[in-house]
Amino acid sequence: MPNTAIHLASYKDIGWARRGWKILSAGYRELAPLTPLYVAVDLPGKGHMVRLYGTATKGSDVNLSGICHQLQKAGAYCSLNPDG
C-alpha cells in the first residue's frame, strides 16, 4: 500500500473506524480528495485491529506525501509507511 494510501488511525472495530473517518474528514479539509479504506489486521500484543487509510482514487493527481505532511503539521497522526 505504500504511495497509494496514508495510514490515519487504528481502531478495535469497523464501527469505530467508520466514525473515525467521519471525524477526521470533517476536521481536516486536507482529506477531502481521499476516500477511506479499512483494513483488518492482527497485531502482536494488540489483537484484531482495523486500520484506517485515506486513499486517492485511481488516476487522480493527489500528493499523499503533501497531505500527510499537512496533517502532521496540524497535530494529527499520519504515516506514509504504516508497516514501518
Image: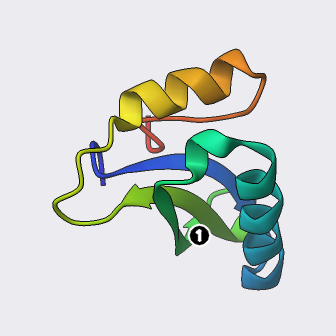
Residue type, mark 1 in image:
Asp
Q: Which residue reaches farthest left?
A: 59
Specify whether residue 45 is in view.
no
Residue, x 82% and y 72% (percent of image)? 19
Count neighbours of disc 1 (C-alpha within 10 A) and say few if under 14, some if 14 to 19, many if 20 or more.
few
Q: Using the image, determine if residue 73 lies above or below residue 19.
A: above
Residue, x 62% and y 48% (percent of image)? 8
Specify whether residue 41 is in view.
yes
Q: Using the image, determine if residue 54 lies above or below residue 57.
A: above
In this rendering, position of residue 55 left or right of residue 16: left
The residue under label 1 is 42
Give the colour scheme of this rendering: rainbow
Front position in the image: 18 or 28: 28
Specify the quadrant of the image occupied by residue 74. top right
* Horizontal and vertical percent position of residue 82: 48, 43
* Horizontal and vertical percent position of residue 34: 47, 58
In this rendering, position of residue 18 left or right of residue 69: right
Q: Quadrant of the C terminus?
A: top left
Front position in the image: 41 or 8: 8
* Horizontal and vertical percent position of residue 51: 60, 63
The count of marks equals: 1
Residue, x 43% and y 35% (percent of image)? 80
Specify the quadrant of the image occupied by residue 61. top left
SS at badge 1: strand
Q: Which residue reaches farthest top?
A: 73
* Horizontal and vertical percent position of residue 46: 75, 60
Q: Quadrant of the N terminus?
A: bottom left
